[in-house]
């Protein structure tokens, strides 16, 4: 019996040494820090790596996550400045900078951050109107971040970002906002339509004005050209009358017969081309018309005789003589 007792003693001692050694070695993973307590009192902070402690005298206090963490702030009912009931939720991003303060300055760090954020959400949103709350989320986030980060600084943490996830007005308020938005869009559409009609009317008036101006300029140009043509015709008539008068004064009645025959034929042409007269009876003295035509022939004959006399009167140039 004593032999058995003596044989188990080394094994017990070895087991005690293994247990003590195992408890003396502490491995801290990356991204974490442990607090070391001696007789329940904070002694130091253990960084990531392998550490030795005194078993039974020293013990691990808190295991603190030093990485950036995310907290979901649950939805809560908030009353805005203009008495609108809103449902608001958010997310908080924070990181522990001092493990000892995070472990011993506040109990239940995550719950404390959530409650502090919810309280400040009610304060910030309650100081703003509904329209400001819906349109100025960046301002809300900035104000929340400033206030919460300052309040949590003694806890050894840094609040890096607070974001409002959703702002939910009540259903009846959403319907009112939808009707208001529709009315505003209808108003803009009517204004745009009126502006379009106005521009179209202005452009149409401008076009009609330019058309009238161009038409007036065309009529002016046509009138000027007609007047010029009538002036030239009058000058030609005057010259013809002068020539006929001169011929009559010299005793040549053939020019007068030509002038009368021309007017006579033009009058017959006008009657023939009149759109209102298809058949007409006109007493015509054939002898007078033939006489007039004969006068035209006499004029042509006299002109040809004058040309022959002009050729015969011209000097004849013989060969060899200088021109």
Image (cartoon, rainbow, N blue to C red):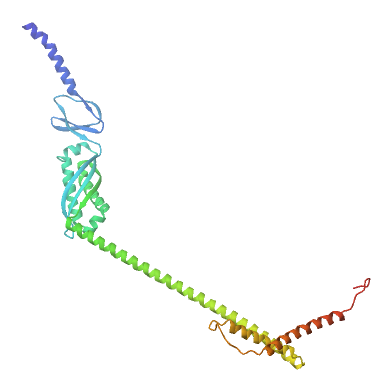
Q: Is residue 264 left or right of residue 304?
A: left
User: Residue 275 at what x, y percent from top left?
Assistant: 54, 81
Closest to the observer: 83 or 93?
Answer: 83
Give the total number of marks visible in the rendering.
Answer: 0
User: Residue 39 at what x, y percent from top left?
Assistant: 13, 29
Query: Where on the picture, by quarter, is residue 82?
Result: bottom left
Q: Is residue 269 left or right of residue 316?
A: left
Residue 286 vs 90, above or below: the answer is below
Residue at the spot 18% in from the left edge and 37% down from the top edge = 103
Q: Return the residue found at the far left.
A: 1
Q: Is residue 270 left or right of residue 63?
A: right
Closest to the observer: 151 or 90?
Answer: 90
Query: Where on the picture, by quarter, is residue 97?
Result: top left
User: Residue 228 at what x, y percent from top left?
Assistant: 62, 81
Closest to the observer: 300 or 87?
Answer: 300
User: Residue 214 at what x, y percent from top left?
Assistant: 51, 74
Residue at the spot 74% in from the left edge and 84% down from the top edge = 297
Residue at the spot 19% in from the left edge and 23% down from the top edge = 24
């Amino acid at each position: 019996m004593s032999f058995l007792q003596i044989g188990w003693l080394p094994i017990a001692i070895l087991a005690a040494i293994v247990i003590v050694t195992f408890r003396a070695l502490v491995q801290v993973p990356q991204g974490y820090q442990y607090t070391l307590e001696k007789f329940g009192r904070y002694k130091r902070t253990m960084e990531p790596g392998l550490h030795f402690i005194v078993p039974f005298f020293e013990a691990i206090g808190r295991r603190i996550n030093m990485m950036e963490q995310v907290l979901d702030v649950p939805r809560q009912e908030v009353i805005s400045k203009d008495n609108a009931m809103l449902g608001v939720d958010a997310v908080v991003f924070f990181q522990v900078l001092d493990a000892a303060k995070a472990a011993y300055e506040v109990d239940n760090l995550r719950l404390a951050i959530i409650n502090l954020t919810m309280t400040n959400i009610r304060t910030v949103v309650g100081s703003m109107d509904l329209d400001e709350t819906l349109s100025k989320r960046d301002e809300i986030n900035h104000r929340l971040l400033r206030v919460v980060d300052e309040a949590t600084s003694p806890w050894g943490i840094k609040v890096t970002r607070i974001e409002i996830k959703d702002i939910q007005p009540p259903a009846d308020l959403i319907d009112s906002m939808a009707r208001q938005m529709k009315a505003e869009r209808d108003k803009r559409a009517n204004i745009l339509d009126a502006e379009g009609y106005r521009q179209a009317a202005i452009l149409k008036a401008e076009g009609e004005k330019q058309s009238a101006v161009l038409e007036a300029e065309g009529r002016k140009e046509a009138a000027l050209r007609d007047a010029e043509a009538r002036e030239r015709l009058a000058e030609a008539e005057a010259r013809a009358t002068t020539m006929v008068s001169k011929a009559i004064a010299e005793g040549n009645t053939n020019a007068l017969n030509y002038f009368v025959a021309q007017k006579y034929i033009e009058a017959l042409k006008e009657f023939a081309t009149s759109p209102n007269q298809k058949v007409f009876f006109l007493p015509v003295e054939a002898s007078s018309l033939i006489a007039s035509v004969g006068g035209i022939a006499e004029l042509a004959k006299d002109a040809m005789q004058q040309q022959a006399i002009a050729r015969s009167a011209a000097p004849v140039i013989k060969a060899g003589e200088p021109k």
